[in-house]
């Protein structure tokens, strides 16, 4: 048994059975080991950003890591943007990155790089594996990826560790228990609520998944407690029967307005609410300047325990309160296709138990108001702001949940970053409906120009933000990657296409042409 075989057997013994891969020469022994050791599903991506983004979507929905297989420093570097998004989401991912053979690193060959330094940029844990310790190192990496509610672990394996004799396969140990809330912080939060202050409870992570929302419903009866979610979250349980928790808006003025009356802000596994960017003459933090901030625990801690403890101390009902049903969406009363009517029509027609992946950026900011009362679903979103996550994330989510329809809202500009994910969806016949919001521009950046005080951009500035001359043809792009596609420009046309796409098994793309 060589090291590559020892690695695969250790991963399988540790319940890691999906690998998203874009391998090269240094990983050929690992590729060969996949034939000799059955049980690993290996999914090829044509670009490393697709590989890492798919691992993100998989980890969010499966609740366990997939592994990536990447080629040297440049391969890892190509995947960093979506690893950044995954790290912000606390998605568990294990990166296996091939390196030159140990005795070859002394030479300045073309692909030689400082791979540990690259791994350090984006990893919570990283290590260079050694000969005859590959199983031990891999098991340690799996444990690291599963730690602290999800981490990015990167195991760098010189090529000779793959062809040299391997150590006996191992089973990864369970991670250390999650850190629990600070008793003094709990006491301060209880005192703030009992004093009658207007208290905001800002949550993220497991708190906005199904079990977490049930815990949050225990606080409904506290009239001076308001619930808020971070603007960006790993996975959000949404739709009928789920508690509606408002997100902090992206827009600074709207966010400040939402939090204007909060006197004490209690953070439960979340960060203080900061503006997405620093703008001239705008605040950096979104709560009032005199607002008291109490952090019950850092992100990555035991959020569920903290919420239950706080609710118990406040005497909240053990079962929580019944969730008021949000109004069910209805089809728009116009045939004009725009972002709002697309969201409204999709929400009305959404299949039960779907997974929505949202990278619609500027166009999709009204999505939540239409989907509060839609069919129950999970909502995944870009968490680190590095665009190019939507198509790969939908790919990984579909691998994790083959029995659920995945709906991907994608902006035309951001979709071009990782267009190759469509090929993987076609090859694997993944059940993904992609909706391209084709406004033929980086529309969010037009708003950002105004945000930094540039009200009258010239022709050169406009040309940097528009996707014209030529316009992108998403129907041809999809078909070129093996996916059936249609283009629509009316609500009735979109509704018809969406119904057909949801009835269709396998990938399908709808290009929605916006005015």
Image (cartoon, helix red, strand yellow):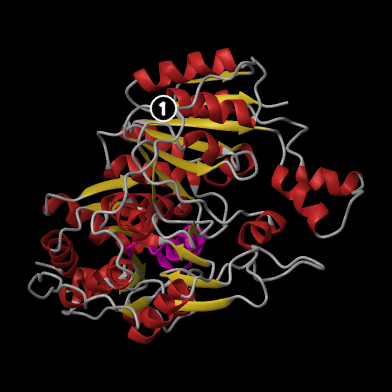
Which quarter of the rendering shows the C terminus?
top right
Q: Residue 214: x percent and y percent?
A: 30, 52
The residue that appears at 82% across and 43% down in the rendered structure is 463
Q: Residue 171: x percent and y percent?
A: 11, 69
The foreground one among 301 and 253 is 253
The image quarter in which residue 191 lies: bottom left
The foreground one among 462 and 451 is 451
The residue that appears at 29% across and 78% down in the rendered structure is 180
Which quarter of the rendering shows the N terminus?
bottom left
The foreground one among 398 and 381 is 381
Q: Residue 174: x percent and y percent?
A: 16, 72
Q: Is residue 75 magenta?
A: yes
Seen in the picture, residue 414 relative to 384 is either above or below; the reply is: above
The foreground one among 370 and 300 is 370
Seen in the picture, residue 82 relative to 148 is either above or below; the reply is: above
Q: Main secondary structure of the magenta part?
A: helix
Residue segment shown in magenta: 71-95
According to the picture, the residue beneath numbered tag 1 turns out to be 350
Left or right: 185, with 465 as reference point: left
Q: Residue 166: x percent and y percent?
A: 13, 73
């Amino acid at each position: 048994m060589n090291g590559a075989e020892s690695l695969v057997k250790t991963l399988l013994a540790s319940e890691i059975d999906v690998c998203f891969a874009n391998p090269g020469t240094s990983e050929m022994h690992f590729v060969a080991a996949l034939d000799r050791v059955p049980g690993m599903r290996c999914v090829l991506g044509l670009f490393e950003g697709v590989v890492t983004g798919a691992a993100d979507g998989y980890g969010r929905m499966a609740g366990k890591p997939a592994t990536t297989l990447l080629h040297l420093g440049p391969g890892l570097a190509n995947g960093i943007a979506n690893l950044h998004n995954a790290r912000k989401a606390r998605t568990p991912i294990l990166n296996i990155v091939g390196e030159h053979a140990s005795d070859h690193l002394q030479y300045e060959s073309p692909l030689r790089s400082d791979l540990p330094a690259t791994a350090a940029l984006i990893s919570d844990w990283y290590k260079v594996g050694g000969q005859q310790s590959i199983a031990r190192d891999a098991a340690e990496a799996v444990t690291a990826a599963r730690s602290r509610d999800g981490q990015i672990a990167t195991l760098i394996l010189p090529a000779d560790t793959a062809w040299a004799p391997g150590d006996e396969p191992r089973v990864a140990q369970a991670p250390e228990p999650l850190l629990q809330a600070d008793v003094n912080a709990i006491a301060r939060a209880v005192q703030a609520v009992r004093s009658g202050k207007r208290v905001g409870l800002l949550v993220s992570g497991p708190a906005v998944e199904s079990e977490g929302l049930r815990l949050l419903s225990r606080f409904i009866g506290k009239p001076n407690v308001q619930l808020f979610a971070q603007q960006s979250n790993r996975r959000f349980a949404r739709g009928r029967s789920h508690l509606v928790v408002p997100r902090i808006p992206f827009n600074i003025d709207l966010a400040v307005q939402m939090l204007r009356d909060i006197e004490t802000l209690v953070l439960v596994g979340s960060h203080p609410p900061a503006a997405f960017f620093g703008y001239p003459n705008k605040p950096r933090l979104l709560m009032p300047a005199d607002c008291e901030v109490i952090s019950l625990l850092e992100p990555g801690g035991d959020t569920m325990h903290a919420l239950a403890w706080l609710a118990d101390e406040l005497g909240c009902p053990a079962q929580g309160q019944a969730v008021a049903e949000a109004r069910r969406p209805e089809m728009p009363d116009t045939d004009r296709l725009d972002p709002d009517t697309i969201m409204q029509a999709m929400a009305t027609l959404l299949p039960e138990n779907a997974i929505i992946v949202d990278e619609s950026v500027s166009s999709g900011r009204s999505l939540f108001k239409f989907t509060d009362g839609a069919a129950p679903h999970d909502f995944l979103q870009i968490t680190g702001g590095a665009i190019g996550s939507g198509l790969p994330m939908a790919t990984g989510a579909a691998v994790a949940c083959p029995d659920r329809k995945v709906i991907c809202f994608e902006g035309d500009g951001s979709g071009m970053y990782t267009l190759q994910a469509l090929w993987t969806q076609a090859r694997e016949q993944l059940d993904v409906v992609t909706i391209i919001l084709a406004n033929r521009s980086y529309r969010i950046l037009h708003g950002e120009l105004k945000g930094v005080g540039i009200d009258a951009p010239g022709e050169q500035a406009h040309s940097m933000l528009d996707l014209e001359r030529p316009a992108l043809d998403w129907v041809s792009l999809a078909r070129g990657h093996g996916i059936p596609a249609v283009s629509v420009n009316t609500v009735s046309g979109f509704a018809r296409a969406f119904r057909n796409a949801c009835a269709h098994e396998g990938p399908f793309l709808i290009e929605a042409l916006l005015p």
